[in-house]
Structure formats: C-alpha cells, structure tokens
Image (cartoon, helix red, strand yellow):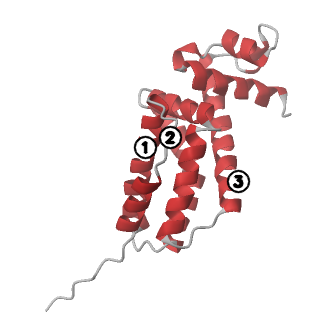
Amino acid sequence: MGTRREELLDAAITVLGERGIHALTHRAVDATAGLPAGSTSNHFRTRDALLNAVVERFAARERAAWEDLARRMYPTTPQELAQVLVLAAKEATGKLRTLTLARYAILVEAGIHPSLRAQMSTTGAGVNAWFMQWLRVAGSTDPERDGPIIMNHYTGLVLHDLAIPDPAFDPADQITALVTTVLRPRSVEVPS
C-alpha cells in the first residue's frame, strides 16, 4: 500500500477511468478511496492541483507497466516488437483497462488545457525513449519516422477496443503486418 496521497491519486485514476473527466471531484475521490469527506481537498486544494497530481501519478503507473513489460520482453526483431505491442494492447484493454481509460480522458483534457499537454509530453518522454530504443534494436533505420506510424496505429486499435469492447480482441495480425512492413529494410537509391 502506498502513501495516503498515492491512495487518493489511485482513486482519482479509478474515477477517471470508470466515470470520465467530469466525474473527477474531490468528493468522488474521497468516496472511491473510502475516506472521509475532505480528505482529497486536504492534499489537493483545487481541481487543477488534483488533476496535475493525477497526471504525475498516472505517468508513474504507466511507466511501471512499461518497465514490467520491458523486464519480460526485449524485442530484437520486427516480429518480436509486434509481439510486445500485441501484449501491451491486450493488457491495456484488459487488466489495465481503467488506467488506459484514464489516460485517454487525460489526453482529451490536454487538448483543452495546454499545461496538461506539456505535462503529458514531459511525463511520457521516458516511455517514448524506450520505444525508440526498441525500434532501433528491432531494425528501424528511422525511429523518428517509424515510431509515430506504429504508435498512432496502436493507439487507435486500443482506443477502438476501449470504446467498443470485443471479447475476442486480438490485434496480432494488424500489429504484426504494420510493424513488419514499416520496419522492412528500405533500399537506398544510388544516383547515377
């Protein structure tokens, strides 16, 4: 069990992931955490302070999930990278569903609040750096180009399954086809 602050922030992530951004109130977090009224406002005086702290806690939990994945798998080929992404997608829509839904709620809110956008970019930098390294090791000659192509498709697959859950969700064919195509060695044209 973490600190009281972490307990409150985890409850806030649950509120976000289960009920959306508009349900994120101090009172809802208190109730979800099973704590007396006023507990959340004692730690986070304003809703903005709560939301900013939620972004930090969310980022720490997301990093921990990626670290766990990285300990289990280290992709060295396009096929292995695809396997990692398939596993990540299944976890994001399965056991980490509430955390993932909270992520999307925060991302939508970041579109309206530039300070959240900057905070999400900063906190996501570590996961992005790992993914870029995985791309290089798996054979990408241009990770800055390949990364957004693969991750934007991955994000869309996950978002679609969160919005319209499919008990048979299996993105393996799509992700494998995409990753192996994007990371396929490109021929270099030599000027004549």
Kindly state the secondary structure of the residue where label 3 is placed.
helix
Residue closer to the observer: 117 or 181: 181
Q: Nearer the viewer, residue 122 or 24?
A: 24
* Disc ID at residue 157: 1
Q: Which residue is mark 3?
A: 68
Q: Secondary structure at mark 1?
A: helix
Task: Classify 177 as above or below 117.
Answer: below
Give the mark, 3 or 2, whose residue is nearer the N terminus: 3
Is residue 44 rendered to the left or right of residue 4? left
Asked whether the beta carbons under mark 2 and mark 1 sit within 8 Å of each other, the answer is no
Element at label 2: loop
Of badges 2 and 1, the one in the foreground is: 2
Left or right: residue 112 versus residue 10 is: left
Of badges 3 and 2, the one in the foreground is 2
Q: Is residue 147 above or below residue 158?
A: below
User: Mark 3 or 1 closer to N-term?
Assistant: 3
Mark 3 neighbour class, 10 Å CA radius: few under 14, some 14 to 19, many 20 or more:
few
Task: Give the amino acid at mark 2.
Answer: Ala
Mark sitting on residue 114: none
Horizontal and vertical percent for residue 89?
53, 47
Q: How far across and how far down the image is residue 13, in percent?
A: 65, 27
Q: Amino acid at mark 1?
A: Leu
| Cα distance in 3D space between marks 2 and 1 | 13 Å
**Position of 51 compared to 2: left or right?**
left
Residue to which mark 2 is pinned: 168
Residue plotted at (71% across, 61% down): 71
Residue in the image at 46% along x and 49% along y:
171
Q: Earlier in the sequence, mark 2 or mark 1?
A: 1
- Identify the residue at horizontal 66%, vertical 25% (top origin): 14
Q: Is residue 150 visible?
A: yes
Res 112 → quadrant: top left
